[in-house]
Image (cartoon, grey):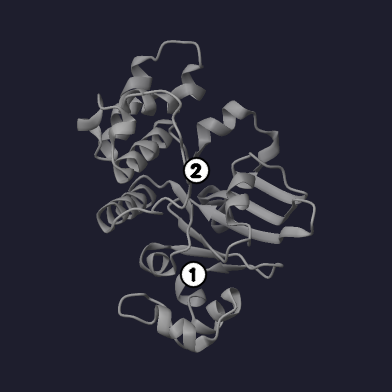
Amino acid sequence: MEKLKGARMRTLLKTEGLSFSYGSGPLIKDLSFEISKGDLLWVLGPNGAGKSTLIKLLTGYLKPASGAIKFEGRELGLASVNELARTLAYVPSEIHLPYEFSVLETVLLGRAAHAGWWRDYSGQDRAAAALALEETGMSAFSARPVNSLSSGERQLVFIAQALAQSPKLLFLDEPTSHLDVKYTAEILSLLKKLAVEKRLGVCLVSHDISLAAASASRLLILKKGGGNLFGAPADLLKSSILAGVYGLKEESVRLFLGGAGTGVNSTR
């Protein structure tokens, strides 16, 4: 009984038989998995498998056709927009700011669910923003216009904005896309630290299997038409599995991903 209670306390989000369609057949079909405190979950899969759509479902932007999404045991659909914003944070693949906000102003926007849109920010809001900037290494950039920063610096600002929400779950869509090695390493190190030290549940969408092998605690691999896979990287990153997911020959997978340090198992 105590083990079951402990498992429930660790589980932040759980899906049961989740399905979704845009109208031309199911994009996501009968998907069940969970995200726990301290997880760094990578969502992999080919284009068109529903990775970005899944993140929008898990953050309440889209509603499932069937199945359940539960956050800490409660149906996600029962939560208000404000409740979601106080517990779930989402960093999209692309963010365009319509105005010339400073870094600090941008991060403070993450406090809207706590402060309200038309109220002044409190000392607590400013402290949360300052902590988020410190955690992302962006404190020295507070007064800089966001649009003057590099792509990597901007991504760190948007992660800081998400952290200012004080979430329990952090979702990111392609957070290292188009970034150089320096910022890719910095961001992945930061996400791992947030999961391990702050016990956040971190879930990110990516195409990069080798990076997932290096940092994921668990994997969710989406396949077109269903038959999705959820488990430990050591169990799923095998050439036979990846060949089936991506429609490749096993030899091609081994040649493409079999270099030193990928973590991909060439066996079945």
Q: Residue at 20% x, 31% y: name it.
A: 140
In the visual, does 52 lie left or right of 213? right
Label 2: element kind: loop
Q: Residue at 58% x, 49% y: name it.
A: 55
In the visual, does 208 lie left or right of 88? left
Q: Is residue 149 visible?
A: yes
Badge 1 amino acid: Ala
Marks 2 and 1, how far apart at CA: 25 Å
- Residue that label 1 marks: 232
Give the residue furthest to the top.
Answer: 119
Q: Quadrant of the N terminus?
A: bottom right
Q: Is residue 268 visible?
A: no
Badge 2 amino acid: Pro
The mark found on residue 183 in the picture is: none
Q: Position of residue 73 (x, y in %)?
A: 64, 44
Q: Position of residue 90 (x, y in %)?
A: 50, 41
Q: Residue at 70% x, 55% y: name it.
A: 16
Could you classify mark 2 by the number of other residues whose Cα lies within 10 Å: few (under 14), some (14-19), or many (20 or more)? some
Question: Compared with residue 87, is residue 183 higher up or lower down, i.e. above or below?
Answer: below
Quarter-of-image position of residue 227: bottom right
Question: Compared with residue 81, is residue 89 higher up or lower down, i.e. above or below?
Answer: below
In the visual, does 70 lie left or right of 121? right
> Which of the marked residues, 2 or 1, is nearer the chain's N terminus?
2
Between 48 and 137, the one nearer to me in the picture: 48
The mark found on residue 92 in the picture is: 2
Label 1: element kind: loop
**Labels 2, 1: front one:** 2
Question: Compared with residue 72, is residue 239 higher up or lower down, i.e. above or below?
Answer: below
